[in-house]
């Protein structure tokens, strides 16, 4: 998505340029090049012709003085630019074990390492110190913050998130909020990159969260679990109309399955 600017008032133009520079976004002035379908136009002029036809068909138009007030509304403008063209949604993978001790955290970290996107996000929902250890062993570059430093909000400025692997972990004084409270955060993060959730044990609450987040459940431990645990897991899948990926127990087969998670 290209950003075009057509603002005549000097003060408003300075605000637009300043906001785009803060975001690290390039922009074009309307002239030799014209906006196309999917582009964004920031303008303080009427976006229609005298015949009431759109000047920039197929482009998103942000009207200065109508959609956003400048100066003063720079934060609103940045949110609009940040979410424009954001229909693409990266996958959300919820890793959960049918029972304990089946390698759920290990599988989640392997999925993080295999992601080839510019940004990848890891959410620790089970307060497992092993997640930090496995990340340190598996990758030399990741940023870790704790839940107490996170404001769960849909108004994240996606373009300002760090690239690479960002892990939100439990700490000595902070644990993850309830899974259902994390939906705005997950929906915002998935616009920037895949989201890998280490959810611990597969439960009804996690199944409900997975469905609400339009996420893919990745279940670990089918063979290792007792029959009643497998039946309970399948019942939760049916209840929320979820189609899971069951990870095989063998390492090579599991890695091949993890790579396929990103193919679609």
Image: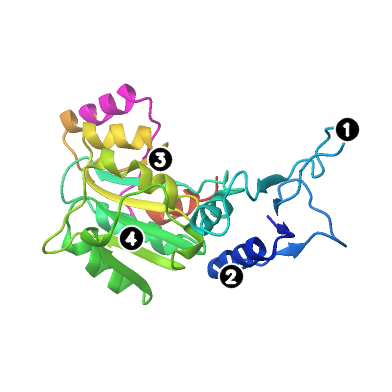
The residue under the point 64% across, 51% down is: 64
> Which one is in front, 73 or 120?
73
Whether residue 93 is visible, yes or no, is no
* Gap in angstroms between the C-alphas marked 1 and 3: 48 Å
Determine which residue is flagged by label 1: 51
Viewer-nearest of discs 3 and 2: 2
Query: Residues under labels 2 and 4: Cα distance?
Result: 35 Å
**Residue lying furthest left:** 172
In the shown orientation, is residue 138 left or right of residue 190?
left
Of the residues under marks 1 and 3, which one precedes in the sequence? 1
Outermost bottom residue: 140
**Does label 3 or label 4 sit earlier along the sequence?**
4
Q: Earlier in the sequence, mark 1 or mark 4?
A: 1
Residue that numbered label 4 is attached to? 109
> Within the magenta stretch, is there residue 44?
no
Q: Position of residue 215 (x, y in %)?
A: 40, 40
Q: What separation in Å lies between label 3 and label 4 (alpha carbons)?
A: 16 Å
Nearer to us of marks 1 and 4 is: 1
Q: Secondary structure at mark 2?
A: helix
The percent coordinates of residue 226 (x first, y second) are: 16, 35
Q: Does the magenta run of residues contain 235? A: yes
Q: Kindly identify which residue carries mark 3.
A: 216
* Residue 244 visible within the image: yes
Mark 3 and mark 2 lie on one chain; the one further toward the N terminus is 2
* Spatial separation of the CA atoms under disc 1 and disc 4: 57 Å
Q: Is residue 151 above or below residue 146?
A: above
Which residues lie in the magenta part? 231-251
Cα distance, mark 3 to mark 2? 36 Å
Q: Is residue 85 left or right of residue 225?
A: right
Number of the label disc, if any, that sits on residue 21? 2
Work out whether 128 lies above or below 217: below
Quadrant hosting residue 210: top left
């Amino acid at each position: 998505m290209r950003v075009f600017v057509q603002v005549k008032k000097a003060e408003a133009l300075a605000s637009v340029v300043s906001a785009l520079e803060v975001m690290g976004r390039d922009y074009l002035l309307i002239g030799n090049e014209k906006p196309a379908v999917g582009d964004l136009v920031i303008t303080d002029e009427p976006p229609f012709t005298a015949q009431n036809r759109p000047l920039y068909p197929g482009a998103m138009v942000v009207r200065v003085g109508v959609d956003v007030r400048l100066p003063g509304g720079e934060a609103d403008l940045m949110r609009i630019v940040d979410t424009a063209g954001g229909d693409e949604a990266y996958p959300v993978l919820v890793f959960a074990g049918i029972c304990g001790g089946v390698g759920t955290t290990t599988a989640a970290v392997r999925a993080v390492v295999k992601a080839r996107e510019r940004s990848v996000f890891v959410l620790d929902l089970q307060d497992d110190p092993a997640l930090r250890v496995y990340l340190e062993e598996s990758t030399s570059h990741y940023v870790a913050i704790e839940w107490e430093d996170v404001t769960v909000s849909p108004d994240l400025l996606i373009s300002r998130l760090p690239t690479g692997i960002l892990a939100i972990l439990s700490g000595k004084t902070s644990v993850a909020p309830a899974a259902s409270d994390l939906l705005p955060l997950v929906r915002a993060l998935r616009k920037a990159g895949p989201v890998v959730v280490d959810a611990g044990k597969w439960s009804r609450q996690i199944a409900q969260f997975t469905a609400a987040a339009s996420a893919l459940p990745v279940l670990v431990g089918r063979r290792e679990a007792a029959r009643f645990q497998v039946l309970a897991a399948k019942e939760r899948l049916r209840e929320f109309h979820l189609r899971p990926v069951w990870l095989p127990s063998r390492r090579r087969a599991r890695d091949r399955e993890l790579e396929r998670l990103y193919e679609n």
